Image (cartoon, rainbow, N blue to C red):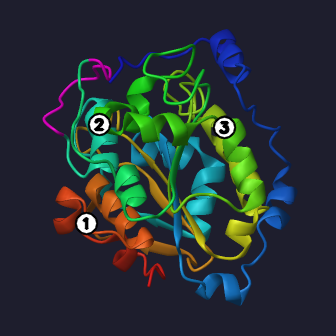
Amino acid sequence: MRTRRALAPLALIACAAVASTWTAQPAPAQTEFRTAIPQAASSAASARVTKLLVFVEENHSLAQMKTGMPYTFGLAKRYGYATDYRALRHPSLPNYIAIAGGGMYGISDDGGPETHQLTGRSVFAQALRHHKTAATYADGMPGNCSLTNHGRYAVRHNPWTYFASERAACRKRDRSMAAFVTDVRSGRLPRVGMVVPNLCHDAHNCDLATADAWFRSVMGRIQRGPDWKAGRLAVVLTADEDDRSDGNDNRVLTTVIHPSQRHRVVATALTHYSLTRLYDEVAGLPYLHRAASAPSMAEAFRLPVR
């Protein structure tokens, strides 16, 4: 968790222009947005979801993301979002580990993989063990499964790197945004997937408008890809935690984007463990640790996972 400070205008401009291994395209005009996401074909809307791709933003509340990310919240209203989805604690790292591991493993700080060498199983390795595909894509990461910070790549936002017993799989399948672009185009996105934006694109160091523009560009690619068009891919965007500006309720915007969703607003109390459970439900896996008792996002959103 960082101390939040207002960014000077020049700093915002510099942050928005930061170089990355994969640079967002300029946001299209509003009229183009209406045509870029056509009404889903009935076949895609009724198709069974077999792939889940999760994006995690940083340190903003539900209210902040609603107002500060107009494109993203526009998608949330068009498809579906939760009004009572809560992060689990502060600071960031325990929330990432909870999503990926179904538990926080006693972590209460943002220490690196050298400090927290977890021997449990992640949802990514769980998928591989059951002969399902898994991959993570980290924006700005200098090499596969990098265990140290580099530029705007923050290792604490890349949870697979903490599971020390899974290092070989991580080095093979925790990859760059260039690999993400290739997998989107070819229809080879994994059953269990996560995208880790860099510190600017996740709104940690830059403003929400910058994160919103980046996500808009990424979603444009996804919606032109065969996984989306076939209806087999669902995309979830959430945030690791809020910034305590709304008290300490830790409610964050969490949207489920899939053609089956039509203006759905979910009031069910959900947490990051519900997201772990959704990974398991989509990929047909046993529930991982606390995912077993978490409220089901698939049921709450009536997502066709079976």
Dot 1 or dot 3, earlier in sequence: 3
The answer to whether residue 154 is seen in the rendering is yes
Q: For residue 287, which numbered disc appears in the image?
A: 1
Mark 1 residue element: loop
Question: Mark 2 Cα within 10 Å, few/some/many (few <14, many 20+)?
Answer: some
User: Which amino acid is tagged 1?
Assistant: Tyr
Q: Quadrant of residue 231?
A: bottom right
Which of these two is toward me, 180 or 253?
A: 180
Mark 3 residue element: helix
Q: Quadrant of the C terminus?
A: bottom left
Q: Is residue 222 left or right of residue 257?
A: right
Q: Alpha-carbon distance for marks 2 and 1?
A: 20 Å
Residue receiving disc 2: 165
Please check the rendered image and state whether residue 113 is part of the magenta-colored stretch, yes or no.
Answer: yes
User: Which amino acid is tagged 2?
Assistant: Ser
Query: What residue lies at 19% left-to-right and 67% top-to-bottom?
Result: 292
Q: Tell me which segment is drawn in magenta.
A: 105-114
Q: Alpha-carbon distance for marks 2 and 3?
A: 24 Å
The answer to whether residue 137 is seen in the rendering is no
Q: Position of residue 32 (x, y in %)?
A: 86, 57
Q: Is residue 187 left or right of residue 123?
A: right
Which of these two is toward me, 65 or 47?
A: 47
Which of these two is toward me, 242 or 288?
A: 288
Q: Alpha-carbon distance for marks 1 and 3?
A: 29 Å
